[in-house]
Image (cartoon, rainbow, N blue to C red):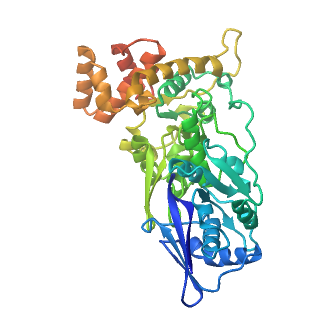
């Protein structure tokens, strides 16, 4: 009879908890019991682990084996516990000294021949182990470079269960991560100078980048809506290490993080098709839900092209993430939380037929109302900037008509962002778009004439309280772009005009 314990990590969304695996070998009929709320993939581990142990040259105890995963109330899913389960059984049977497993977390799925296979979510698992104070982690060799994105942890990569056993006994060394060379660098992005005309829209995208605001572009086909939206990420600041780790953790959970990728520098740009399903957009799936497009766009841009072609229920499900910066998904195995603080950029044609010239539109008023009604009032109220695109009438540029490039505009954006971050740093807000309305109203005593104008719009139903707060956020961004200390009446009125698609900046 013997008792031993090993350690692994259980993921609950992007959050991880240290899981203690107790292995008990006692009297009774030979067999293996696995307790602790395992899902189907984990419950099948009994067969994988036994075959892997035997095919690694070890003896499988022909006695009653009980494996308990604690905390018992936390649902466990996936196959990442296999290596820890196998080592726990071997320690309880005397093949390993139990003290060898005390300060190490073991991750990986086992093949029947003992190979250690890669699993999703290695990066957040290693982050959770570091938070729990564990400094040694064994990961699949294929995920070693991914795990190396986490500092302050001793990492080794295993290709076979036999290698893990020999390493624990001190008979061999396992591979460690290779040192990363040089600082993180931003890859080249599309240049803003490629966009022809559309001065109003170019100014609006600069304001959006400077303050983190949501945008709606409406215009005829081929007027540059998608081009301009794709150039937004080139204006945004680089991700700092904390933000990059958040982005990489979500990608790891989704299985979209290449094993040799550096920490990302450029904010992500995600553009789902209008035929996307609800689980693919906000997250879902069987068991504990997986992240969707809104979480993949965390700290970046979510672009919805042809937004009126999305189902109204899909668009309305974005309302809570836009306000709270996260997605909470309830499933039978529990509630998971995924980060989803993104900038929303939407683009649409002015009508279903979308002729090159507006006067050629043949849509009836009922058709237009039905078309525009897919974007609900509450959802539209969460959009800070609405811009109308004009048809492009000429692609020729004179020598004095060269528009500003990305580098020039980005310099102004970074200066405005730094002013906003310095202002709100004490409260933990990174941009003007994250500041709650009450805090804005405390910091911005409006001029009497401006306050009266806003009150009149509220009374007439032309502006909601949420819309007023969003106008104040845009006013602060306009103030930062011109280098002033406080917004004035002109900034507030310009922000109000930007709430209407026909307005100029």
Residue at the top extreme, as displayed? 400
Closer to us: 150 or 121: 150
- In the image, 269 versus 341, the foreground residue is 341
Which residue occupies the extreme bottom position in the image? 29
Residue at (63, 54) in percent of width and height: 137
Corner quadrant of residue 50: bottom right
**In the image, is 123 to the left or to the right of 454?**
right
Q: Is residue 300 visible?
A: no
Q: Residue 353: x percent and y percent?
A: 56, 43
Quarter containing the N terminus: bottom right
Q: Residue at x 61, y 44 (%)?
A: 150
| Residue 261, placed above or below residue 156 | above
Quarter where residue 436 is shown: top left
Residue 196, image x and y in percent? 65, 23
> What residue is at 45 percent from the left and 50 percent from the top?
327
**Spot occupied by residue 474 in the image (x, y as percentages of width and height):** 41, 25
Q: Position of residue 350 (x, y in %)?
A: 51, 37
Vertical comparison of 185 with 22: above or below: above
Is residue 94 something that shows in the picture?
yes
Residue 254 relative to residue 335: left or right: right
Name the one closer to the observer, 445 or 348.
445
For residue 27, side relative to residue 179 (left or right): left
């Amino acid at each position: 009879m013997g008792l031993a314990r090993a350690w692994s990590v259980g993921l609950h969304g992007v959050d991880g908890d240290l899981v203690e695996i107790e292995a008990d070998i006692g009297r009774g009929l030979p067999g293996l019991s696995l307790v602790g709320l395992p899902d189907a993939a984990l419950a099948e581990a009994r067969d994988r682990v036994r075959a892997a142990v035997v095919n690694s040259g070890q003896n499988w105890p022909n006695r009653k084996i009980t494996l308990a995963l604690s905390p018992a109330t936390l649902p466990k899913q996936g196959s990442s516990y296999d290596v820890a389960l196998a080592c726990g059984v071997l320690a309880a049977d005397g093949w390993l000294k139990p003290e060898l497993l005390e300060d190490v977390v073991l991750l990986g799925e086992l093949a029947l021949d003992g190979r250690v296979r890669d699993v999703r979510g290695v990066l957040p698992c290693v982050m959770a182990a570091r938070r729990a104070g564990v400094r040694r982690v064994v990961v699949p060799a294929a995920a070693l470079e991914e795990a190396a994105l986490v500092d302050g942890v001793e990492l080794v990569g295993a290709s076979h269960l036999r290698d893990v056993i020999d390493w624990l006994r001190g008979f061999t060394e396992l591979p460690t991560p290779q040192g990363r060379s040089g600082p993180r660098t931003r890859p080249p992005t599309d240049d803003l100078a490629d966009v022809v005309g559309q001065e109003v829209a170019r100014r609006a995208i600069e304001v959006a980048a400077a303050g983190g605001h949501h945008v709606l572009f409406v215009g005829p086909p081929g007027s540059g809506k998608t081009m301009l939206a794709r150039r937004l990420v080139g204006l945004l600041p680089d991700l700092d290490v904390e933000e990059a780790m958040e982005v990489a953790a979500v990608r790891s959970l989704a299985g979209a993080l290449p094993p040799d990728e550096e920490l990302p520098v450029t904010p992500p740009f995600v553009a789902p098709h209008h035929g996307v399903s609800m689980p693919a957009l906000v997250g879902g799936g069987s068991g504990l839900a997986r992240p969707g497009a809104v979480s993949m766009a965390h700290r970046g841009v979510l672009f919805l092209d042809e937004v009126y072609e999305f189902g109204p229920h899909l668009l309305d499900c974005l309302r809570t993430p836009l306000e709270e910066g996260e997605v909470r998904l309830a499933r039978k195995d529990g509630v998971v939380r995924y980060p989803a603080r993104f900038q929303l950029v939407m683009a649409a044609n002015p009508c279903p037929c979308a002729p090159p010239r507006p006067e050629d539109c043949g849509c009836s008023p009922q058709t237009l109302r039905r078309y525009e009604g897919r974007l609900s009032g509450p959802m539209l109220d969460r959009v800070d900037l609405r811009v109308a695109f004009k048809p492009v009438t000429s692609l020729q540029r004179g020598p004095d008509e060269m528009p500003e490039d990305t580098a020039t505009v980005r310099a102004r954006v970074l200066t405005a962002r730094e002013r906003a971050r310095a202002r709100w740093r004490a409260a933990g807000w990174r941009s003007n778009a994250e500041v709650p309305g009450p805090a804005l109203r405390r910091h911005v005593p409006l001029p009497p004439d401006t306050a009266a104008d806003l009150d009149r719009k509220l009374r007439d139903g032309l502006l909601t309280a949420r819309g007023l707060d969003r106008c104040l956020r845009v006013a602060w961004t306009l103030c930062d772009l011109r280098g002033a200390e406080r917004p004035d009446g002109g900034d507030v009125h310009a922000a109000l005009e930007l709430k209407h698609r026909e307005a100029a900046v």
